[in-house]
Amino acid sequence: MIPPFLTRSFLASYRWWALAPVLTALLTADVARRAHPPLIYGSAVLVGSLLAGLVLQAWMIEAWFAPLLAIMARVQ
């Protein structure tokens, strides 16, 4: 059985996911080092960090459960 596209893309890219926290940490450090960071920039860093985490978590869950759900659908 060939895994679904989401699973294949997850397995092809999960090694690069460590860059998301590194990039987030760099952007957060940039916001923290400024005396008066623009509100829009700080907000964008916060929203981007949260969104990246949520998207990566949802992608991981879907990538691992999609093959299981496909097998269960074929068994029924």
Image (cartoon, rainbow, N blue to C red):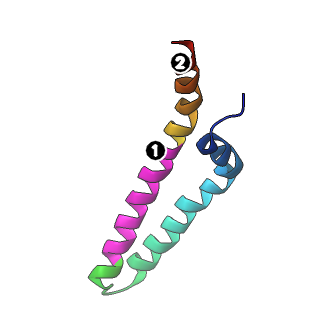
* Up/down of 8 relative to 25, above or below: above
Q: Is residue 26 left or right of residue 40?
A: right
Q: Residue at x 46, y 58 (%)?
A: 52
| Element type at mark 2 | helix
Q: Quadrant of residue 71?
A: top right
- Distance from the alpha carbon under mark 2 to that under mark 1: 20 Å
Q: Which residue is drawn at 46% across and 44% down?
A: 58
* Up/down of 50 relative to 70, above or below: below
Q: Where is residue 12 in the image (x, y as percent from the top left)?
A: 71, 49
Q: Residue at x 59, y 29 (%)?
A: 67
Badge 2 is on which residue? 72
Q: Is disc 2 surrounded by few (<14), some (14 to 19) or many (20+) residues within 10 Å? A: few
Q: Residue 2 carries which label?
A: none
* Up/down of 23 relative to 36, above or below: above
Q: In this view, does 61 lie to the left or right of 11?
A: left
Position of the N terminus, as image quadrant, is top right
Q: Where is residue 39 in the image (x, y as percent from the top left)?
A: 27, 81
Q: What residue type is labelled 2?
A: Met
Please tell me which of labels 2 and 1 falls first in the chain: 1
Q: What stretch is highlighted in magenta?
A: 42-59
Q: Where is residue 37 in the image (x, y as percent from the top left)?
A: 33, 84
